[in-house]
Amino acid sequence: MEYLGSCLCRTVQFRVVGNFEDFYLCHCGYCRKDTGSAHAANLFSTTAKLEWIKGEEEVKTFHLANTDHVKAFCTTCGSALPNLQMEGKLLVVPAGSLDTKLDKIPDGHIFISKKANWDESLHTFKKFERFPTDN
């Protein structure tokens, strides 16, 4: 399988060749800080290969001291990008960074005991096609 992806400003573009073994929604405090949201949505592979098509020099990787937590991002727009962890043995790809349709669905939620206190029954809230207005 081949997947194409990019950052929000498209300064960085990449290709992943191979399959993702796992897809998890992570609720740990680090991932919530990384995304500013309820959870991160990350794909994991021990066999897929990452190729930077454009803008590799704009990718910064942040490794949180004294942890295994790593985040790569575009230095122009801040979008989360793929990174290699575990001495290059594990490819982690933020699902939202992919431009190619992803047929894999999440395998589950992880670090659920760390989830935000406001992250309950989110599926029951009102849904809007676009930003709601008073009109």
Image (cartoon, rainbow, N blue to C red):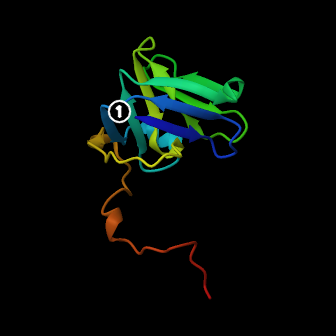
Horizontal and vertical percent position of residue 63: 53, 21
Identify the residue at horizontal 46%, vertical 34% (top origin). 93
Q: 74 above or below 135?
A: above
Q: Quadrant of the N terminus?
A: top left
In this rendering, position of residue 49 left or right of residue 28: right
Q: At 73% from the left edge and 37% from the top edge, which residue is drawn?
A: 76
Residue 134 position within the rendered picture, expressed as x and y whole percent measured from the top left: 60, 85
Quarter of image, res 56: top right
**Residue 55 sits in which quadrant?**
top right
The mark total stands at 1
Report crowding for label 1: few under 14, some 14 to 19, many 20 or more residues within 10 A (C-alpha): some
- The answer to whether 119 is drawn above or below residue 36 in the figure is below
Residue plotted at (51% across, 24% down): 50
- Is 30 placed above or below 130 here? above
In x, y percent, where is residue 54? 68, 30
Q: What kind of element bears circle 1?
A: loop
The residue shown at (62%, 88%) is: 135
| Left or right of 125, for residue 133 | right
Expressed as whole percent of the image width and height from the top left, the position of residue 14 reads 58, 32
Q: Residue furthest front?
A: 1
The residue that label 1 is drawn on is: 20
* Amino acid at the residue labelled 1: Phe
| Residue found farthest to the top | 87
Furthest toward the bottom, the residue is: 135
